Each structure stands twice: as structure tokens, then as C-alpha cells.
Image (cartoon, rainbow, N blue to C red):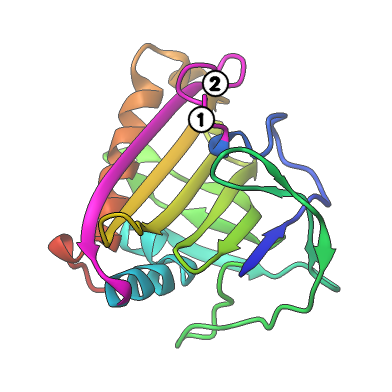
Amino acid sequence: MRRGTFREGTVDYAAVGATHAPDLMQYPPEHSTPAEESWRIGSGEERFRTAGEALLSWTAQRAAGLELSDVRPAAGDTYTGVSFDADGAPIAPNRSEVEQRFDAEGTPFVAPGTTLKVHGRVGGMRADAELRVISVTEEHRRIGFVLGTVGGSVVSGEESFDVDWRDDSDEVWFTVRAFDTPASVLYRLPGMVKRRRRELFARYLRAISPLYATPV
């Protein structure tokens, strides 16, 4: 099992980690719009491992039509700090050396503290942003990570991506949760934040689900 949480540096919102709060949809961070979607993407360990590998190699972002640049792992030792389990209970901090992995193009895999820039548009709406990986989870039946905005986006907030292999049914589920606060005047108009989020969620599903196989 590997869990990593990165706390150094600054994101542009206060409720760091709130996408994993059990009551996000009922009590989102102040002035933000919450969102959550889950999709069954198959069953069995092979499907889980394949989806998890795709997730940690930025497939959701790339296949959603976003260009990644300036991907920088955190400097120094990785601190696997306080994280939270599925019930919201804190997990004790510890230190461990985590080997950095790279994809076929030499881009570092998702790791705590990694910063990156994304560029692109979704449904005619801007998706440019500077982001930081807040935390990473690699467990026997769950793989995922949390991304937070640092700046340069039309919204500020957080996204979490999780692939779960359920032990009660053998099904594999892909869940994305988010909360967004408008940072641009245009996105304060009614419905703009929700519209942008719906388009992003749909693209993430097409990227990870074998039913919507999209070459990267």
C-alpha cells in the first residue's frame, strides 16, 4: 500500500483534500459547486490494474484533449503524510522512498507534490491551469490521486480521481469528484461552472473506460 500527501507550497483554495470528504455533495466548501460521478468500467483485477496504470500516467487528462507541460516532481524526499481512508479516518504519517516512474514519452507518473500545467478547451470553454498533485493512493483495491489548482484557471478548486475494485462484487468503478469556485467573471454566470464540469467528466470517462477507448 502507498499513500502520499504533499503539503508544501500553495494552492489557490483553502479546503485542501475536501474532494474525499464523505459529505462533499451536501456540504461543499463555501461558494463552491460540488460534482461527483461514478461509472462501472468493468470487473476483475486485470481491468483494475489497467485502469489504475492509465490513471497514474495522466491518461484521463490527455485523452480529454488537454496538453500537459512543465511536469515537475516534488524536489527532495517524498513525505507520505496524513491521508484519510474511505470513511474519512486519518492515517498516521510516515516516511518512505517512492521510486519515480515515467511513461513511454518520459513524462513522470502522478506523484505527491508534482506540479504541471495543462492547456486546452472543453466544449469551447477554457481548461488552462497550473495544478499540483495533493495526494496519491495506491492500495490493493484502490488507485487514485487528487489535483488542486495553483493558478491560471477560470475556476479554483480540486478534483479527485479514484479507481476502485470492489471486493463484494468484483466490479471496477471509476469515480471523479470535484468542487469549483469561479475565478473568472464569465464563470460566475449561472450554469457555467456546472457545464464546464459536465464536459470534463464526460471526457475523463471516455479516457478510462474500455467502452470509450480513445488512443492517447
In the displayed structure, 170 sits above or below 132; it is below
Q: Is residue 62 above or below residue 96?
A: above
Numbered-mark total: 2
At 38% from the left and 71% from the top, the residue drawn is 54
Q: Is residue 115 above or below residue 103?
A: above
Q: Position of residue 160 (x, y in %)?
A: 50, 46
Left or right position of 115 against 193: right
Element carrying mark 2: loop
Question: What crowding class fits label 1: few (fewer than 14 Cα within 10 Å), some (14-19), or many (20 or more)?
Answer: many
**Residue 28 vs residue 170: left or right?**
right
Left or right of 208? Residue 20 is: right
Left or right: residue 74 versus residue 208 is right
Label drawn at residue 32: none
Q: Which residue is drawn at the image coordinates 54% and 66% (left, top)?
A: 139
Whether residue 38 appears in magenta in the rendering, the answer is yes
Location of residue 117 in the rendering, given as x and y in whole percent from the top left corner: 58, 57
- Residue hosting label 1: 179
| Contact (Cβ within 8 Å) of mark 2 with mark 1 | yes
**Between 99 and 170, the one nearer to me in the picture:** 170
Residue 206, by quadrant, is bottom left
**Residue 30: horizontal and vertical position, in percent?**
61, 15
Task: Inspect the image, locate mark 2, and give the three-letter code of the amino acid beneath it.
Answer: Pro
Q: Quadrant of residue 81?
A: bottom right
Name the residue at 57% across, 50% down.
146
Taking the spot 28% from the left edge, 39% from the top edge, the residue there is: 199
Q: List the single residue furthest toward the left.
A: 211
Residue farthest along the top direction in this orientation: 190
Which residue is at the front of the view, 83 or 66?
A: 83
Can you identify the residue that label 2 sits on? Answer: 28
Q: Name the quarter where the N terminus is drawn.
A: bottom right
Region in magenta: 21-45
Precedes in sequence: disc 2 or disc 1: 2
